[in-house]
Amino acid sequence: MKQQQKKKRAYPQQEQQIAVAPGQRFPLTIKRLGIDGEGVGFFKRQVVFVPGALPGEEIVCEVTKTKGKFAEGRIVKLRKSSEERIAPPCPVFDACGGCQLQHFTYNGQLREKKDIVRQAFERYTKLDLDSLDFRDTIGMEEPWNYRNKSQMQVGSDNGKVIAGLYSINTHQLIDIPDCAVQHPQTNKVTNVVKQLANDLNIPPYNERKRTGVLRTIVTRVGFESGEYQVVLVTATKTVPKLELLVEEIKRRLPDVTSIMQNIQPKKTSLVFGEETLPLYGKEKIEERMSDFRFDLSPRAFFQLNPIQTKKLYDKVKEAARLTGKEKVVDAYCGVGTIGLWLADGAGELRGMDVIEEAIQDARKNAEAHGVRHALYVTGKAETWLPKWEKQGWHPDVVIVDPPRTGLDRSLIDTLLRVKPERIVYVSCNPSTLAKNVNDLTAGGYELKLLQPVDMFPHTAHVECVVLIERR
């Protein structure tokens, strides 16, 4: 009953239809942050989301949109500012939309990210969070320049090639020459390639007209190794002056490790296409974390914040509580990072991923680290777990690290049938996490641990490590 009351207080809009209209103005007190980093306030018991508003602030709000039982608004006047409001260091912060919280003190961000997780569980479960181990968000000592990979869309502005991100909820491309959360080397590479595309008259891709060539400049850098790779994502295989472009990149970036071309001819929001061609240097770059070394191909998944990744994986290892005997499954294994981090405590390790390139990398990474008790296969966990079960192989611990959409229902059903003793869930979306946990607890499991980790400072994103045990 206590949790139901909490849910009603957090989401009173569920009880009645929205009564405000676009253009309407009213005073609003901001109570908390929403899952996308916007301020949340209540007007006549109805929820209003206001981008840029911070908890504790009193504003004059103008409704910009109503959607079902919710309203969105903008700040017309800041009547009482939060003591935690600061000047954002990024000159395009308001226009870009890549970061949502640069105007908020970092301690404030960490506190509210824990509350974002709480909100999701209050909304989608009836669990009593006060009765379990719900920890404070783990932050960074230096929360800037932490991203090891940039994907800058290419476009044109008055005939000049620009590269950056689309402004939030628009197709207006914002030129970003120096992103404060990117590793400085990724900014440098993007600027060099952008200038060369200008100098060589290589046409940027126009999404609306479906003309042009250069779509995206992707750069990944190894924080520990110092190696870096540039991937030119193009709409066509043929690129004008490609050889000259590659030679100029090598001349201006003489320490570049790898230059690749990826062809994405489809009308899609997906950055990468299926075909990748080497243009110069190694096809993969190396990254190191503690005693581990990983070879990364252009499309292989790897955590974007290597500094926080170590803390995240240590929490996964802590939650798994391995004794050296357990059979461990690393679902969504990618290049094998999480599984290899836990391998010294596992009796046997098995991992799977739907991307064949990632599985090949995982096998090589396991071999390079002398991990002989690991098996990696291509496919989905919901396909392989029942096969192994029929063969008499039963996992004790399953690690899942799904995309933002969460676990497929088929995998949840498979886990409930296979019944591992422990499930360690690494989540990048509190809403789908809460929904999945609700399904698993309804099927005989118990939530034991919630550990938020701030992988992306100054954004609204929050990662979570969750321990779920069989009752």
Image (cartoon, rainbow, N blue to C red):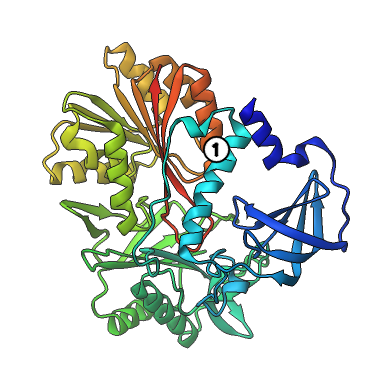
Image point (30%, 45%), residue name: 313
Q: Would you place residue 115 above or below residue 437 in this image?
A: below
Residue 285 lies, in percent from the top left, at 25, 61
Above or below 269: residue 339: above
Point out the image quarter for the C terminus: top left
Visible residue check, residue 280: no
Which of 275 and 359 lies nearest the eye of the viewer? 359
The residue drawn where x is 22% and y is 30% is 322
Query: Could you say where residue 450 lies in the image, as x and y percent from the top left?
Result: 43, 38
Quadrant of residue 2 in the image?
top right
The disc labelled 1 sits on which kind of residue? Thr
In the rendered image, which quarter contains the N terminus?
A: top right
Q: Quadrant of residue 359?
A: top left
Q: Nearer the viewer, residue 282 or 391?
A: 391
Residue lying farthest bottom? 199
**Residue identified by numbered label 1:** 432
Does residue 133 appear anywhere in the picture?
yes
Place of residue 156 in the rendered image (x, y in percent of width and height, measured from the top left): 59, 78
At x 46%, y 16%, the residue is: 444
